[in-house]
Each structure stands twice: as C-alpha cells, then as structure tokens.
Image: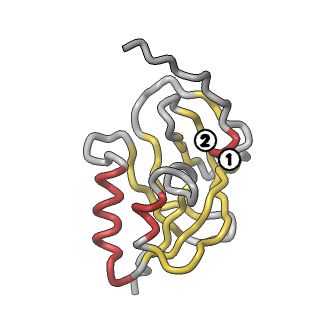
Amino acid sequence: MTHVVTDLFVYGTLLPGDVRWPLLERYVTGEGRPDAVSGLLYDTGLDYPAAIFDESATELILGRRYSLRIDVIEEALRELDIEEDTVDGLYTRVEVTTQNGTKCWAYAYGTGLDLTPIPSGNWFDRPPRPPQQFNG
C-alpha cells in the first residue's frame, strides 16, 4: 500500500502572520506543529525566502507542519504549485522528512538569484531591509 503525503512543511510567506497564510489557511486542519527540515534558508531580497533542502546538512530550516484537508488536497496542491511558480521552475514541490520523522510536501528553491543566507533558519530572523524611497 502506498502512503499518500498529506502534510505540508512551510517556512516563509505561507506561515501564519505572513502575506500568503490566507491562501493556505483554508486548506489545513488544525493549528499545525512547529517542525524543522535539514537544509539552508536564504533571503531572496524580494520579500520571500528560498529553501534548499539537504538531508546531510547540519543546519535546520525552521517552520510549521500542517495537515492538508483530504477532501481538497489535490486542489490545495494545484493552487500552491501555481502560487509557488512551479511551472516556471522558481520553486519545485518536493517530499521532505521533518525532524520529527513526518513525510511532507515542501517547496524547494529552483533558480538562481543572489541569495543571502539566514543562519538561524528562521524566516522571521532575516535582516531588515532599508526603507524604499518612492521617486515618482
């Protein structure tokens, strides 16, 4: 019997309190659980992070693990794939195993921008951006 992956690990703008949480919120059951995945987290400089998952890494990407509602899981993954720009390869949906041993879907970074490491692995610890000035 094949195990169907029904959990999603999120580490950035899909977290509660960030801009894309409302997109994910309607597809999850429960409040989620803090968890982590081996790899490196980067700041793209574009107000969203990039994760490079690596089971051999000693660093951890901190986030939350959510169970997706079974009745809408295909719709949820389809919409998240579009939002994460998997069609153009900006991100790729991959299967990861969290520190607590749960298999989850997660979005791994797929293309080359100038990335700034976030050593803590926590998106909310990213360096502050200087204020932008409008020259219009």
Q: At 66% from the left edge and 54% from the top edge, which residue is drawn?
A: 62
The disc at residue 11 is: none
Of residue 3 and residue 77, the one placed in the foreground of this image is: 77
Q: Amino acid at mark 2?
A: Leu
Examine the image and state in which quarter residue 36 appears: bottom right
Q: Position of residue 130 (x, y in %)?
A: 61, 22
Name the element at disc 1: loop
Q: Which residue is mark 1?
A: 122
Q: Residues at badges 1 and 2 in contact (C-beta under 8 Å)?
A: yes
Q: At 44% from the left edge and 62% from the top edge, which residue is drawn?
A: 22
Q: Which of the two discs, 1 and 2, labels the residue nearer the N terminus?
A: 2
Is 85 placed left or right of 49 in the picture?
left
The residue sitting at the bottom extreme is 1
Q: Which residue is mark 2?
A: 41
Q: At 54% from the left edge and 71% from the top edge, which residue is drawn?
A: 66
Q: Position of residue 110 (x, y in %)?
A: 41, 39
What is the crowding at mark 2: few (fewer than 14 residues within 10 Å), some, or many (at least 20)? many
Q: Amino acid at mark 1?
A: Asn
Q: State the quadrant of the N terminus.
A: bottom left
Q: CA distance from mark 1 to mark 2?
A: 8 Å
Of residue 32 and residue 9, the one placed in the foreground of this image is: 32
Examine the image and state in which quarter residue 97 appears: bottom right
The residue sitting at the top extreme is 135
Q: At 62% from the left edge and 64% from the top edge, which residue is drawn?
A: 98
Q: Position of residue 59 (x, y in %)?
A: 71, 45
Is 80 placed left or right of 29 in the picture?
left
Q: Position of residue 54 (x, y in %)?
A: 59, 47
Of residue 119 and residue 135, the one placed in the foreground of this image is: 135
